[in-house]
Image (cartoon, grey):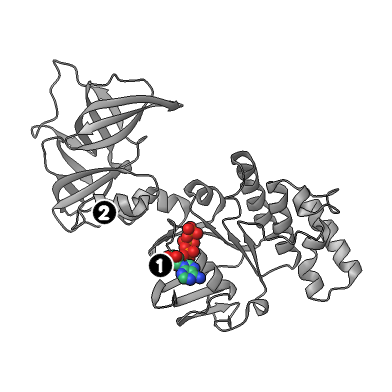
Amino acid sequence: MAGAAFLSASDITVGYGGGTVLDRLSLKVERGEFVALLGSSGCGKTTLLRTIAGFNRPRSGQISLAGRDITTASPDRRNMAMVFQSYALWPHMSVAQNIGYGLKLRKTPREAIAARVGEIAAMLGLTGLEARKPGQLSGGQRQRVALGRALAVEPDVLLLDEPLSNLDARVRLSLRHEIRALQKRLAITAIHVTHDREEAMVMADRIVILDSGRTAQDGTPEEVYNRPRSAFVAAFMGAENVVALKGAADGERIAIAAGPHNNAAAIARNGRALTSGSFQARFRAEAASLSPVLPSAAIPSSATTGEDALELLGTVRQTSYPGGCWRHVVAVGETEVSVDAARPVEPGTSVILSVPSAALFLFDAPQDGAAAVSHAVAA
Ligand SMILES: Nc1ncnc2c1ncn2[C@@H]1O[C@H](COP(=O)(O)OP(=O)(O)OP(=O)(O)O)[C@@H](O)[C@H]1O
């Protein structure tokens, strides 16, 4: 299998009973790569991880590891280790016994287990806690033990199923960085399931976004954040403001027609795939700049054509301070959008929102309205 990825799932279909959860999904992971599976609840992340681990059998498709077909291999013949959200430690065993558990199952000599457990405990900052039971540890310490148990067997692939979700915010942030540093130092191949966008962004080399059992996008954190391929991915990556626009894609330019609440604009196409004349524009709260309309100033009209920026006319409805900047809820026609600004603007003020082309995501309008996308993401 020359040229094949270290771990490869090809066209796998997986379901429970009569239902299908993963629909001809493919995933490739290179040796030493850290891949995050990101998606909303129920989209099939854990099912994919469990199928790779061998706990679920695909109905069709193939899984291979280092050139070996493991589609039907039992979990213990895959040399993978899994870390769960719930730690899944043996409560009656000590930290040392938990960490050494996999090695004991493999009939590793007792002295070798002790040496490896000592090494792992030191690596994970657990030295001195070896004799404690899991019930005598904090959540963060328990998850370190679970990680230690997984690493002790030197797995070919480390599978992480939302390992940080049960931890408090501070511990979660520090463990994120520790796991990533350890993964890089030991060149571990890892797949990390999460529904936390920022966690995926800071930990992974590559993010695979799943939507209803299919891959919505597969790319580096920068790619999926800055060049979302669909409205679903844009919304999932935080571009939750939605505005409907009319226009035409013409060669390298996109001509946006003036509307009741926007001026005409000429936007560089930059690879945006648009076919229809009705667009859905998406942008993040921090992407737009907000300026009050002075009574004497002209409002955007079809007479002005914005170059590489979209201008929207709206009215501030709410102003709040979540920290760092001021957040405004702005009504643009029937739609409300969120916009951040360094200074507060009073509710009731008419404003112009300017969204630069680079921060404006444009897609063909969905047949059943923009709301369908927002609901899919919020679910
Ligand atoms: N053992 C099972 N039997 C039947 N249906 C299941 C089983 N496990 C999962 N499902 C269903 O399969 C779908 C995908 O579940 P899965 O746990 O893979 O999603 P997920 O993306 O990991 O979700 P979450 O982020 O909430 O953990 C869901 O609709 C779920 O109800």
User: From the viewer's perspective, is 245 left or right of 165?
Assistant: left
At x 80%, y 65%, the residue is 100
* Pointer 1 residue: 213
CB atoms of marks 1 and 2 within 8 Å:
no
Mark drawn on residue 139 = none
From the top left corner, tell me how far across and down residue 189 is, in percent: 62, 64
Residue 173 versus residue 16 in the image, above or below: above
Does the rendering let one see residue 44?
Answer: no
Q: Amino acid at mark 2?
A: Ala
Q: Secondary structure at mark 1?
A: loop
At x 87%, y 62%, the residue is 115
Mark drawn on residue 372 = 2
Residue 57 versus residue 175 in the image, above or below: below
Q: Amino acid at mark 1?
A: Gly
At x 71%, y 52%, the residue is 142
Front position in the image: 122 or 263: 122
Q: Secondary structure at mark 2?
A: helix
